[in-house]
Each structure stands twice: as C-alpha cells, then as structure tokens.
Amino acid sequence: MPHKTNPLVLFIKESWLLLVSAFIFGLLLAGINAAWSPKVAANKELKIQDAIVALIPATANTQIAVDNQPIKLSDKDSAKTSIFKALDKNNKLIGFAFTASGAGYADRIDLMIAVDPDFKKFLGYKVIFSNETAGFGSKIKKPFYRDQYIGAPAKKLTLKKLGNAKKIDDEIIAISGATISSTAVIDIFNKYVDKVKELMTQKGLLQ
Amino acid sequence: MANSDSPKALPTLLAGLWKENPVLALLLGMCPTLAVTSDVKSALTMGLSTAFVLLCSNIVVSLMRNLLKPHLRILMFTLTIATFVTIADLYLKAFLPAMSDKLGPYIPLIIVNCIIICRAEACASKNGLFISIIDAIGMGFGFTITLCMLGAIREILSTGAVFGKQILPAISENWYLTGGMPDGFIPMFAFALPVGAFVTLGLILGLVNMINKKTA
C-alpha cells in the first residue's frame, strides 16, 4: 500500500520557502515604511505649504479648515477637497486655498486654487500634480496661462481660443496647441468653484 | 574548485553593456525605455532604480537558488522583485518627491520589467553570488546608460537642454516677425512625445545593428 503524506506536511514542505520569504520581506517593508513614512508625510505637507505661499505670498502661517471632505461635483461625479486658511504674520486671514483635481490630457491634474477671504476673486492656481505633454500641455504651469486667473472673478469661467490674455476677467485665453489641457484646468475651476463656496458657507468660513 | 563551465566575471560584466545590452540587443524593458526617456533626469532615475532592484533580486535569488522548487520559482522571483521595487518607490517618495511624482506609476511597474525576471531566471538561479552580482551590475549599467543616452538625445532635440540646463541658445519668441533667419535653436517638441521615443530608439537600434554587422 503506498504511503500517504499528510496534506498539511506536504503543503509546508512545498511552500516553506515562500512563506518564510513573505514573512521576512513583509517585516523588511514594514520597517522601511515606518522609518520613511514621516518623511513622506512631511514632503506632502511642505508641498501644500509651498503652493499656498506661492499663491498668497504674504502667508506666514496656514491652517487646515476642512480636511479631505467629500463633495458632489455633479450627479455622476464626486471628489474630495481640503480647504486651507492663509494667515499673515498678525494672524489675519488673507485668503483661502483649496485642492481640486480633474482629468487632463495624459493623466489627472491636481491643483491648489487660492481665493480672497470673501471668495470674490481668484488669487491664482498652482499645479500640484500633472503629467501633461512637455512643451504643450505643461504650459498650464507657465505665467501666460496661470496669470489670467489672478484676480479673475470667483465664478464660472469661459475658455476662448483668441483674445487679450492680459485682460483679467471671466474669459480665459487657451494655450495654443494645448486646448485639452487648457480646457481641463478651466473645467476643474468651474466644477469646484460653486461647490467649495457652498461647503465653506456651511462650515461658517464665509459670511 | 570553480566549475569550468561557469561564466567569467569580465565577459559577464561587458556583455550587459554591449553584446547583451538589455535594450539594444535583447530588446527587453521597452516600456520604461519609451515612456520615461523624454529627459535625462527621469531616464537616470528609472535606470538606477531598475539597477538597484536587479542587483538586490539577483543577490536574493542566487542565495536561495538551491532551495527553489521549480514550480514555485516564478512566484518567488515576483515576491522578491516586488519587495525591492516597493523599497525603491518608498525611497523616491521620501527623498526625491518631485521625481517620484514625475515618474508616477512607472516605478511600481518595474515589477513587471522583463529584464529583472529574465536575469533572475537566466543567471541568478543558475550561478553563484559573485557572478549574479557582476551580471546585475553589467545589465543595470547597460540599461541605465542606454536610457540616459536616449534621454539626452530627446531632451536636446525637444528643448535644447540637458539635465534641465540650456546648452543650445534658445530662440526668441517672435523671431519669425523679424523676417530674418532663426536666432537660436528651434525646439522639436515631437521628440518629447511618444513618436520621438520610437524614432530615436529605432535610429539607435539601426546604428547598433550596423556596427555589429561591420564588426562581426
């Protein structure tokens, strides 16, 4: 009669190396993650801080007012946003900044959008993450396009192919050769502006 | 006593640089080669990250080669590679966050890079630690140098710069209004796009084949 091996013994005999390796690699990764995750978190915080200071240069301190709050952008589309208060050296509120994201040409586009304390006008935007085509869509980071938003009314904006880019109003002139990226940025603004204003009013951040 | 059939160190090292260069001869790792060589900094980061993973996985696979069960070896290779790719990804996130954002999913995708699993199977699982390390160094540097070469060509042609530093004089924005000749380098943006990657790689592969035929 052939000798029958216990299935558990067979399993351990066959897979012990895999199990031991998985355990050791898991420990290694847990250790490295524990050591480096504070640095990763600090990098993220620094990036946000830098973005707010770049948009509102008088900022001496920032405070998180709303953290990762879900908002409904449309019937099908929902997202999360964080809202930050920008304070000057006397701790006076000089503006708000909120995170916003949407689909770009190659990848998602994450923006930090700044508004004045009354939510009457935009103070500009900074690209936190994008992977738009170098030389074309990447121009959403350039002054020609970005500067058009500084001082623009904090309401829905429209994109024009031609016009005077130096005139600050609710009409934004597209980047030549990068219409998809230009549209993506303006879509992000238009999707978020009313919803964020509503959320800020609900949270008592706006009068 | 060393086995007379075992590979020699110097030919193994040099093979990765030219004769068995992973990109130019074996045509492996084409995804990062085409996707992240639009500038030298990205190409160098990707090359060095892949070289690190290749070196670590070759060391681990070589050390456990006598314990590997044939039907579980691919699973073991994947587990090993995934561990070191995660370490490389965490390192970039912690110490080079801008580059980590730029390379995006391409660093985690090193897990499925054929070069690493190919070297684990073809070299590390059959040879001792020393030869496996030499093989990883040769292949890793061969891959990094090729990516940097592609990155340099594409960055110069698309922006006139290398490592972000302008080396060719930039052209004035409205030079064509003067009616004269261009007063600087005209950037060829197509080289920053996927088409530029295919064209550059194709021309380099043609050149390498031509050299190999002449020297054969």
Image: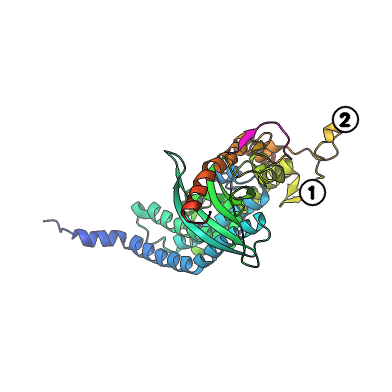
Q: Nearer the viewer, residue A177 or B36?
A: A177
Three-letter code for the amino acid on which mark 1 is drawn: Ile
Bin the neighbour count of mark 1 within 10 Å (Cα to Cα): few under 14, some 14-19, many 20 and up: few
Task: Find numbered disc 2 in the image and state the secondary structure of the residue it sits on.
Answer: loop
Q: Nearer the viewer, mark 1 or mark 2?
A: 2
**On what subunit does the disc labeled 2 rest?**
B
Q: Is residue B156 above or below residue A158?
A: below
Task: Find numbered disc 1 in the image and state the secondary structure of the residue it sits on.
Answer: loop
> Residue A135 lies in what quarter of the image?
top right
Name the residue that disc number 2 marks.
Answer: B179
Relative image position of residue B91 (x, y in whole percent): 54, 62
Q: Which residues are magenta?
A: A157-166
Question: Of helix, strand and loop, which mostly describes the magenta segment?
Answer: loop
Which residue of the protein is positioned furthest toward the left in this rendering?
A1
Name the residue that disc number 1 marks.
Answer: B167
Same-subunit check for callouts 1 and 2? yes
Q: Residue at x 57, y 47 (%)?
A: B22
Q: Nearer the viewer, residue A8 or A119?
A: A119
Bin the neighbour count of mark 2 within 10 Å (Cα to Cα): few under 14, some 14-19, many 20 and up: few
> Is A159 in the magenta?
yes
> Is A116 in the magenta?
no
Q: Residue at x 70, y 47 (%)?
A: B152
Q: Nearer the viewer, residue A159 or B177?
A: A159
Q: Earlier in the sequence, mark 1 or mark 2?
A: 1
Relative image position of residue B16 (x, y in whole percent): 59, 52
Q: Residue at x 48, y 67 (%)?
A: A32
Mark 1 vs mark 2, CA separation in Å: 25 Å
> Residue B126 lies in what quarter of the image?
bottom left
**On what subunit does the disc labeled 1 rest?**
B
Three-letter code for the amino acid on which mark 2 is drawn: Gly
